[in-house]
Amino acid sequence: MAVCPKCASPVETPLGCPSCGTLFPIEQDPDPFEAFGLAPRFRVDKEDLRRRMLRFSRMTHPDFFANAGPEMLERAERASAILNASH
């Protein structure tokens, strides 16, 4: 499992760290399974996916990064777009 470079907490998604709120730079868009921190499989627990969507959406929502500078705002917008496209 990956760890956050800022706080060393385990992270479930390549988009950011829910523990400290750091959004990571995204070199290449993750596939939907990666974006939600799920193992690829045919059947996905809908309730688990819903919980992950809500948790990761709160973490990446651009409104929370409006005053964080243009780079962080851009990361938030891209991460939110990836989540919305993956859902």
Image: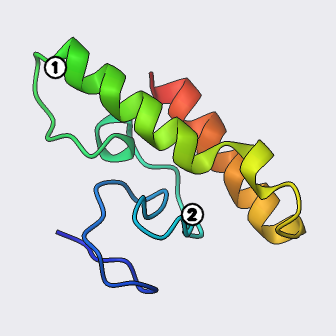
Quarter of the image with the N terminus is bottom left
Could you classify mark 1 by the number of other residues whose Cα lies within 10 Å: few (under 14), some (14-19), or many (20 or more)?
Answer: few
Q: Earlier in the sequence, mark 1 or mark 2?
A: 2
Q: Quadrant of the C terminus?
A: top left
Distance in Å between CA atoms under marks 1 and 2: 25 Å
Q: Establish if 86 lies above or below 11.
A: above
- Label 2 sits on a secondary structure element that is loop
Q: Position of residue 39 (x, y in %)?
A: 14, 41
Label 1 secondary element: loop
For mark 2, does the 10 Å Cα neighbourhood hold few (<14), some (14 to 19), or many (20 or more) residues? few
Residue 11, percent across and down? 30, 64
Which x, y percent locates residue 52?
A: 34, 34
Residue assigned mark 1: 44
Residue at numbered disc 2: 26
Three-letter code for the amino acid on which mark 2 is drawn: Ile
From the viewer's perspective, is residue 87 above or below residue 21?
A: above
Q: Is residue 80 above or below residue 7?
A: above
